[in-house]
Image: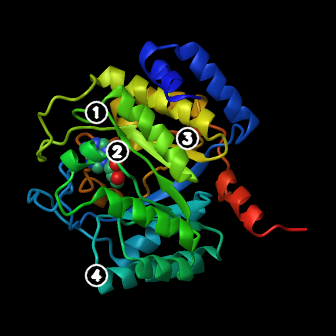
Amino acid sequence: MTKNEIVNYLNAGQDEELFDRAAKVKTQTVGAKVYLRALIELSNVCACDCLYCGLRKSNDKVVRYTLDNQQIEESIKYAIENKYGSVVIQSGEVISQKFTEQIEKIVTQTQNLSNGKLAVTLSCGQQSEQTYRRWFDKGASRYLLRIETSSRELFKKIHPPNIKFDNRIEALQTLQKIGFQTGSGVMIGLPNQTIENLADDLLWLRKIDVDMCGMGPYIPHQQTPLYGKQRAFDQNQTVVLTLRMIALLRILMPDINIAATTALATLDPIARAKAIQVGANVIMPNVTPPNQRSYYNLYDNKATDLDVSQFEIAYNEQGTSQRYQAKCELNHPQK
Ligand code: 5AD
């Protein structure tokens, strides 16, 4: 698909054709199964000051927390008991020896509690190669790090000067080099974002060759500098654009894992099911202890509940990205 075709699909609303095509690709590759990732929001402490994010360092209205050992154990056990194949440990970005060690311990703890059955995914921001390696060596196998937007100019507008586009890309490449199944993604509907930017995002994801992707609508948070800035598209448009982005990505990268995100469900609960129809094959229910959940507000009115009964869930399956598997087999052919 050329950039022109992508732009046309994003613009013109040939949704029936697009969604049919994407659904077919999905059936032929990853199939109908939906994989579960248990999302554990470890801590909302963050050293970054991203202009869109409710957890930004300068937001002094946030009650900061970090789960204690018992709460972490509770969350992991919940994931095991409910037949999840993978957990995602997500937190604000903190760079310290203490944090590195804490994550190491959690990775080991997850492996021990689940007898190695739970795949561990980390989503803990930009870290040094050494830190990534330490986590990988303990057994973390997947990492999520969004580029947020592939437009260098737009990236600059929504991040403070110390967060650099090139460093983010380098971090992603480091993760790939180490051997992580690597995921990235973008926000849709950011102020000043254009349809063309979104088309470029999809091509960028393919170029960097992600194994997994999570894309969701940008949702303004009151206590952030970006709040009140005119969004590129209205809310309904943003939901539809997110669905088109997911469908297009499924066509462009048939064998990756694509998440139907919480941000999408926050704007429109029905859209999550629609996202799965047109290309997504992963959902990430929140298993953080309920009393801590309300403090992890990346954006306003975050959706917290999820009914999985409508989907064909792959219980107890890790759901490795087919694309990642194919790359591994290329590198180490098996007889
Ligand atoms: N709206 C939507 N998504 C957001 N994130 C952070 N703030 C917002 C927001 N206001 C997303 C970012 C980040 C992920 C953890 O949450 O894409 O990578």
Describe the element under mark 4 as helix, strand or loop.
loop
Residue 62 in percent (x, y) is at 15, 58
Q: Amino acid at mark 2?
A: Thr
- Residue at which label 2 appears: 149
Residue in the picture at 67% in, 34% down: 26
Q: CA distance from mark 4 to mark 2?
A: 27 Å
Q: Residue at x 50, y 20 (%)?
A: 9
From mark 4 to mark 3, how far is it between C-alphas? 37 Å
Percent across and percent down for residue 257 are 59, 47
Percent across and percent down for residue 204 are 47, 44
| Element assignment for label 3 | helix
Residue shown at 85% from the left, 68% from the top: 334
Residue behind mark 1: 193
Comparing labels 3 and 2, the label whose residue is closer to the camera? 2
Q: Which residue is mark 3?
A: 308
Q: Residues within 10 Å of mark 2 (few under 14, many from 20)?
A: many
Residue 103 has which mark? none
Point out residue 145 in the picture as x, y percentages from the top left corner.
41, 58
3D distance between C-alphas at marks 1 and 2: 9 Å
Tag 1 and tag 4, C-beta contact below 8 Å: no
Left or right placement of residue 218 versus residue 87 in this view: left
Mark closer to the chain start, 1 or 2: 2
User: What's the distance in space between the residues labelled 1 and 4, CA to CA?
Assistant: 34 Å
Q: Nearer the viewer, mark 4 or mark 3?
A: 4
Residue at the disc numbered 4: 96
CB under 8 Å between discs 1 and 2:
yes
